[in-house]
Amino acid sequence: MFAREEDVLEAAAGWRREGRGVVLATVVETWGSAPRPVGSHLAVDEAGNFLGSVSGGCVEGAVVAEAAEVIADGRPRLLEFGVADETAWQVGLSCGGRIRVYVEKVS
């Protein structure tokens, strides 16, 4: 879901204040045609609720699934999706670009 960056960060902070496990995913690099710019965020809580976007919907499902792992073990991940990446085709990134997304637990 698209939202203003301020709304995404406020949602993440609010969910955390409520005691939920929360992850913030951030686009840290792009190459070629990328649907969302560097600095775009996706906040995900432990129940799978999310707000924001890192790819305009192409890879959000994969990022939300990885967020559950980050909440469980607390270790950040750097995810990469691109058109040449078999995983990207599986999750639908077909815009021709590549993105890197840093996924970290909010504490």
Image: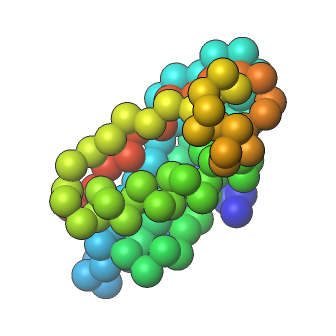
Q: Quadrant of the N terminus?
A: bottom right
In the image, 5 versus 73, the foreground residue is 73
Q: Is residue 14 visible?
A: no
Left or right of 3 on screen, residue 22: left
- Vertical side of 13 occupied by 54: above or below: above
Judge whether residue 82 can be spotted in this image: yes
- In this figure, what is the number of numbered marks? 0
The image's colouring method is rainbow
Q: Is residue 36 above or below residue 45?
A: above
Residue 94 horizontal side relative to residue 22, left or right:
right
* Residue 80 image offset from top left, x and y in percent: 50, 31
In which image quadrant can residue 67 be found?
Answer: bottom left
Where residue 70 appears, as percent x and y from the top left, is: 30, 57
Residue lying furthest bottom in this view? 18
State the residue at coordinates (61%, 54%): 60
Q: Residue furthest top?
A: 32
Q: Is residue 33 above or below residue 23?
A: above
Q: Is residue 89 left or right of residue 24?
A: right
- In the image, 48 versus 88, the foreground residue is 88
Q: Residue at x 29, y 72 (%)?
A: 21
Residue 103, x across and y down, in percent: 38, 46
Q: Quadrant of the C terminus?
A: bottom left
Q: Residue at x 72, y 15 (%)?
A: 32
Q: Among all residues in the image, which is located at the extreme right?
A: 95
